[in-house]
Amino acid sequence: MNITIGIRSSARDISIDLDIEREELVSRVHAAVQSLSVLDLTDNKGQQYLIPARSIAYVQIGEQIERRVGFALA
């Protein structure tokens, strides 16, 4: 699943591809925001993201889209 996290006071956002269920992601975001702790996520490549909950402006959750490779017409 692909998520985008907006950061307060920043014009840029963070896009991450994750291998977790939507419900688990939502509960992790809720828990981090409610406790004002750190949102800890690890992407498909093993890179770890530590995002302070106070700096999260929004979280956009999208579905994983299969990437096409090649020139075939379908």
Image (tube, rainbow, N blue to C red):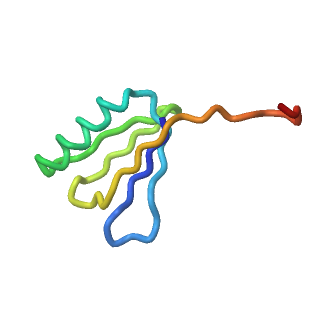
Q: Residue at x 47, y 32 (%)?
A: 46
Q: Quadrant of the C terminus?
A: top right
Q: Residue at x 32, y 35 (%)?
A: 25
Q: Residue at x 30, y 61 (%)?
A: 57
Q: Nearer the viewer, residue 44 or 72?
A: 72
Count of numbered circles in the view = 0
Q: Residue at x 50, y 31 (%)?
A: 44
Q: Measuring from the top left, give residue 2's x and y in whole percent.
A: 49, 40
Q: Measuring from the top left, give residue 24's x and y in whole percent.
A: 29, 29
Q: Name the residue at the front extreme.
A: 74
Q: Name the residue at the left extreme.
A: 35
- 16 lies above or below 19: below
Q: Measuring from the top left, give residue 8's x and y in whole percent.
A: 31, 67
Q: Is residue 70 left or right of residue 44?
A: right
- 25 lies above or below 6: above
Q: Is residue 21 left or right of residue 63?
A: left
Q: Is residue 33 left or right of residue 66?
A: left
Q: Is residue 49 left or right of residue 35?
A: right
